[in-house]
Amino acid sequence: MAVTREQVMAALRTVQDPEIFKDIVTLNMVKDVRVDGGRVDVTVELTTPACPLKEVIERDVQAAVARIGAGQVNVHITANTRGPAGPRKDVLPQVKNVVAVGAGKGGVGKSTIAVNLAVGLNRCGAKVGLMDGDIYGPSMPTMLGIRGQTPNVRGAKIIPHFVHGIHAITIGSLVEQEKPLIWRGPMAHGAFKQLLLDNTEWPELDYLIVDLPPGTGDVPLTLCQLLPLTGAVVVATPQQVALDDAIRAVRMFQLLGAPVLGIVENMSYFVGPDGGEHDIFGRGGAEQAAQRLGVPYLGAVPMFTELRVNSDAGTPEKNFQANPKLAAALNAVVGNLAGEVSKRNMRPVGPELNVV
């Protein structure tokens, strides 16, 4: 049955983005509609290549257009990562989204999550940068497999390492290995600013993941003052003593006006050799904390031996390849983060609520 372009557009207005809850025409996601008798071709542009509900949108478009009588419906999916709407500081105009990864205390796997978020987003097709902002204890040289490698320099600018598909910079590449980094507050502020803005030549990026030092000190404050953060991710382990500090980190970002994109529960449980699951630190505490705080829960990452081995070996891409359960857990967190970034960027611009 022949249909018209107007009928197709009307049908597409009934298709909602399942995360943003607006129709895809209003969201300007429909980029092309071609009608040839009973055949309809629709091009839909997602707000991120890591969209976790890509298949849902494709299925809903096909069903909506088929209902008006189209004999053949072809849906073509593209992606264009969006940055925050409205005016913004132009200190890093080539970077669409800056996402901070923080934690209330050390030892919860914040850097592990930051690395795997960056690699996972890149595996979905995004252009990703990673900054090791943990200037007291940089772990990226080991986790990225770049120990002993110094970055290239162009003029007065440092060119980030290009490794595992991402552009990465760490102060660990600029100082002697095993040398302790002893910083007072102003020194830490200056070193962080120089590495992030002044001395690094970042390329065009969809996401810049910034791994912060643990706690609620100078560096998170500096980041929130320097950049228009798309948002922050807080990493916690399930036990109460870690959650108490994670809650403080959430409150810190809220007080600084930085949107909290969600909480990740790392070391959620241990998977034994027999496949059995053991709740060493308890399980679900981070999800309960997220519900109580009214912030998104991005998912849980279990304790897998492969995750530790690949981090020590500097081969994070293997976390997405060998163990399907580990890959599924990481991909879920990556997809949920990408979804929260897209939702945040679709909202009207306004000040964040300061919570005390």
Image (cartoon, helix red, strand yellow):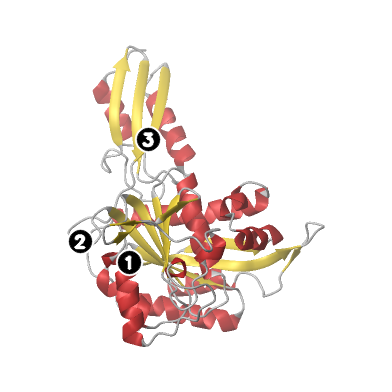
Q: Residue furthest bottom?
A: 184
In the figure, 221 relative to 17: above or below?
below
Residue topped by disc 1: 196
Residue 257 seen anywhere in this rendered image of the structure: no
Check disc 1: other Cα within 10 Å, few if <14, some if 14-19, many if 20+. many
- Mark before the other along the chain sequence, 2 or 1: 2
- Mark before the other along the chain sequence, 3 or 1: 3
- Mark before the other along the chain sequence, 3 or 2: 3
Residue topped by disc 3: 78
User: Residue 163: image x %, image y %?
Assistant: 48, 51
Front-most of residues 164 and 87: 164
Question: Disc 3 and disc 1: Cα gap in Å?
Answer: 31 Å
In the figure, 100 relative to 320: above or below?
below
- Please give left or right for residue 86 compared with residue 315 in the image: left
Residue topped by disc 2: 88
Q: Amino acid at mark 3?
A: Thr
- Secondary structure, mark 2, is loop
Label pair 3/1, CB-CB below 8 angstroms: no
- Please give left or right for residue 349 compared with residue 253 in the image: left
Q: Quadrant of the N terminus?
A: top left
> In front: mark 2 or mark 1?
1
Q: Quadrant of the C terminus?
A: bottom left
Q: Amino acid at mark 1?
A: Leu
**Image quadrant where residue 344 sits:** bottom left
User: Residue 66: image x %, image y %?
Assistant: 41, 24
Q: Amino acid at mark 2?
A: Arg
The residue positioned 27% from the left and 19% from the top of the image is 4
Residue 48 seen anywhere in this rendered image of the structure: yes
